[in-house]
Amino acid sequence: MWCIYFLLCVLLPICIPVPEAAVVLWGTGRIGSAGTFILGVAGSVLGLAVMHTFSSLIAGRILRGRKEKRQLAWLQQATGQYGSLVLGVLLIVPLVSDEVLCAGAAFLKISLPRFLNIGIIAKIISVGMVVFSGSLGALCGLKHWQIIAGEVLLMLAASMCLRRFRKGGQSRYERIHTDCGR
């Protein structure tokens, strides 16, 4: 069961159109909380790395024309300085599939190490919420949705604090100059 669960977690961000929560809940019932958490985070991060690398290889071929470069510059400007935060939240909250987020990160030229840093934090939160929210809720007398809402709020507060206390007043995105051949 351990190998099957790990393989499913690796394949989730690459090609399996099943919600992460369903696989994690299945793993919790078969393996237990600790094993599900460790294998789920490791497998998901490995899958994110594979999909980002694959998307990066393809992105170079797609972005050869001026029109595509202008569209990419617009997307970079639209996400702006909150791109990492938005990406992290979307990796936690299942509004967009991980496949699309990996491809988007490659198109936005977010480096693999930076993407993995975001992915590790996001997957610890998302897998941890599913695995441990039931037992934590029972311990505190809270319902499942209240625990998840609290964890998302804590994640947002932590990321805002990190941004506020980050060294250097100017954002990295404000220093990027994109010449799109206008």
Image (cartoon, rainbow, N blue to C red):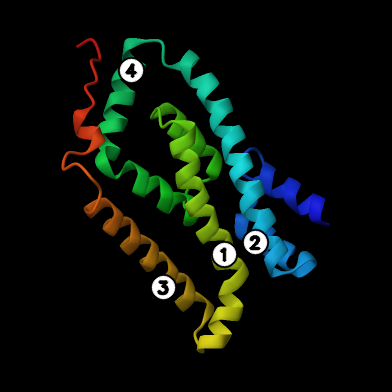
User: Where is residue 86 shown, x and y percent of the image?
Assistant: 36, 48
Q: Is residue 144 above or below residue 159?
A: below
Which numbered dot is residue 150?
3
Q: Are the two marked residues, 2 and 1, in contact with CB atoms closer than 8 angstroms?
A: yes
Indicate the amino acid at tag 1: Gly
Q: SS of the residue at dot 4?
A: helix
User: Where is residue 64 shown, x and y percent of the image?
Assistant: 41, 11
Q: Is residue 48 above or below residue 35?
A: above
Number of numbered discs overlaid on the protein picture: 4
- For label 2, count other residues whose C-alpha is less than 10 Å away and answer few (under 14), some (14-19) or many (20+): many
Indicate the amino acid at tag 3: Gly
| For marks 1 and 3 on the same chain, the one whose residue lies earlier in the sequence | 1
Q: Which residue is tagged 4?
A: 69
- For label 1, count other residues whose C-alpha is less than 10 Å away and answer few (under 14), some (14-19) or many (20+): many
Q: Residue at x 48, y 55 (%)?
A: 92
Which numbered dot is residue 9?
none
Query: Seen from this angle, which residue lies furthest right?
Result: 1
- For label 3, count other residues whose C-alpha is less than 10 Å away and answer few (under 14), some (14-19) or many (20+): few
Q: Residue at x 66, y 47 (%)?
A: 43
User: Where is residue 49 shown, x and y percent of the image?
Assistant: 58, 36
| For marks 1 and 4 on the same chain, the one whose residue lies earlier in the sequence | 4
Q: Which residue is tagged 1?
A: 128
Question: Mark 2 against mark 4, which lies toward the viewer?
Answer: 2
Q: SS of the residue at dot 2?
A: helix
Indicate the amino acid at tag 2: Phe
| For marks 4 and 3 on the same chain, the one whose residue lies earlier in the sequence | 4
Q: Residue at x 48, y 53 (%)?
A: 121
- How much space separates mark 4 and mark 3, taking CA atoms? 39 Å
- How much space separates mark 2 and mark 1, taking CA atoms? 6 Å
Indicate the amino acid at tag 4: Lys
